[in-house]
Amino acid sequence: MASISYVLSTVVMGLFTVGIAIAVVRISTQRQSPVTANQRKRNASAGGESTDALSRYASVVGEAARTPGTWYVGFVVLVFGFAAGALAMVTGPPAIGAAVGLGLIVASAAVFCVFLFWGTYHSGRSRGLQSAQAAMAGAWALGSLLIVAIVVKLVTAAP
């Protein structure tokens, strides 16, 4: 059983993380200029937006991805998801702990790969590359990482 001080420090740090996220959301919303719903509708109708379900869904997802609040909520969900996974891995039975540990490794690798691709993509876009060129640079970065992983595996493999 975990010591009460470890559990308490985990709860305090979790509350601290949530507090930081809330403060950042409040600060960022004060800096943004307010856009009314009527202005959004006018902008959408001026662009000749299609009305099929897929494009409406893509529009809603795109709008949500542009808001800082969505990113903060996603970050908090990831933090608590990883913390819950680590807690389940440590306190659960060995079979469940091994499965959760493997899941945490896969999730960590996925987060790292998404971060690498997204960072490379935005870095390329900010330096004047077109969207397809920046996507190619992100794919190249991921491919290079895969090649390095394969080389390390082949070099360290037992004969």
Image (spheres, rainbow, N blue to C red):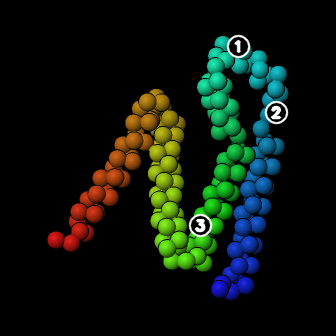
Q: CA distance from mark 3 to mark 1?
A: 47 Å
Mark 3 surroundings: few (<14), some (14-19) or many (≥20) residues within 10 A? some
* Residue 76 screen position, x and y as percent: 68, 57
Q: Which mark is residue 46?
A: 1
* Residue 18 screen position, x and y as percent: 75, 60
- Tell me whether the residue at label 2 lies in contact with that at label 1, contact meaning CB atoms closer than 8 angstroms: no
Nearer to me, 18 or 128: 18
Q: At x 72% / y 15%, what residue is drawn? A: 45
Q: Mark 2, mark 1: which one is toward the viewer?
A: 1
Q: At x 60% / y 78%, what residue is drawn? A: 91
Q: Which residue is mark 2?
A: 34
Mark 2 surroundings: few (<14), some (14-19) or many (≥20) residues within 10 A? few
N-term-proximal mark, 3 vs 2: 2
Is label 3 in a helix, a strand or a loop? helix
Q: CA distance from mark 2 to mark 1?
A: 20 Å
Mark 1 surroundings: few (<14), some (14-19) or many (≥20) residues within 10 A? few
Is label 1 in a helix, a strand or a loop? helix
Left or right for 54, reference 12: left
Q: Which mark is residue 85?
A: 3
- Tell me whether the residue at label 3 lies in contact with that at label 2, contact meaning CB atoms closer than 8 angstroms: no
Nearer to me, 48 or 20: 48
Is label 2 in a helix, a strand or a loop? loop
Residue 121 visible somewhere in the drawing: yes
User: Label 3 is placed on what type of residue?
Assistant: Gly
Q: As displayed, is residue 114 above or below residue 51?
A: below
